[in-house]
Amino acid sequence: MTNINNQQSTTNSQQPTVNNQQSTTNSQQLTAIVLAGGKSSRMGRDKALIPIQDVPMLQLVCTAAADCADKVYVVTPWQEHYQHLILPKSEFVREVPLPGETANQGPLVGFAQGLAHVTTEWVLLLACDMPKLRGEILREWVNELDGVNDEVMALLPRNDSCWEPLCGFYRSSCLTGLMEFINKGGRSFQKWLALCRVQVLIVKDREVLVDCDTPFILNRQVAKDAKEEES
């Protein structure tokens, strides 16, 4: 079984991994992690670069995140694809396969590799394909953190059947338990969250949770935005 304990995560290096030791420095109030490591196989092209109203989706998400966080880590295996984008307060973390693996292992491992850099108590995790997110919405969500009990590990939206793991808040202290789960072969966000204490984040407008990961959803969203502009 692949084990990734006691490995130092580094930014923009060829062999970054994940460290389960958290720094005691708390230099920012909130950190954000944006995952841009998917293969976009359902979309058929790099969804992070698809423009929504002339702005690439990754840039839209990072701009919204920067409105409520002091640091935004963009986790991706191919940072050279995005270096031309305007990503405020952002720093790339190169996602790499785990030792003994030949391919990246999905969003849970990408989250862990980004989380190893976080020094704040809370981190906002976002997918790169959510163009309806706005800074004012995220700031409203941040205000909910003050009411979260100490034993709660994550504050996430929930649909009828499962959590929405790629659009919500996690305590950075979850890294230790996350490492244990990954080292045992776990790769599912839902299965990991089933082991954690999670509180529901109430989202008034569910449209902000739309992830444009297929051509159908993208075209529907573009058409809807165009109709709203006309009205």
Image (cartoon, rainbow, N blue to C red):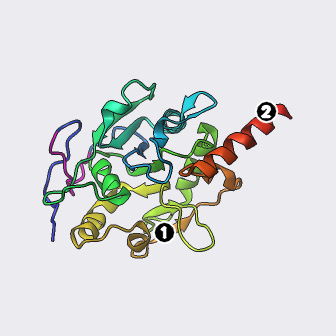
Rendering quarter of residue 192: bottom left
Residue 133 lies, in percent from the top left, at: 60, 43
Identify the secondary structure beneath mark 1. Answer: strand
- Say whether residue 13 is left or right of residue 137: left
**Does the CB distance between marks 1 and 2 fall below 8 Å?**
no
Q: Is residue 159 above or below residue 227?
A: below
3D distance between C-alphas at marks 1 and 2 = 37 Å
Region of the chain picked out in magenta, as a range: 14-24
Front tag of 1 and 2: 2
What amino acid is labelled 1 in the image? Val
**What residue sits right under mark 1 in the picture?**
198
Farthest-out residue, right: 231
Identify the secondary structure beneath mark 2. Answer: helix
Of helix, strand and loop, which mostly describes the magenta segment? loop
Residue 35 lies, in percent from the top left, at: 40, 47
Rendering quarter of residue 51: top right
- Say whether residue 227 is left or right of residue 203: right
Badge 1 or badge 2: first in the primary sequence: 1
Q: Is residue 95 above or below residue 149?
A: above
194 or 97: nearer the eye? 97
- The residue at the point 23 percent across, 48 percent down is 96
The C terminus: image quadrant: top right
- The residue at the point 31 percent across, 45 percent down is 119
Q: How many marks can you see?
A: 2
The image's mark for residue 229 is 2
- Say whether residue 7 is left or right of residue 152: left
32 or 93: nearer the eye? 93
- The residue at the point 22 percent across, 53 percent down is 97
133 or 214: nearer the eye? 214
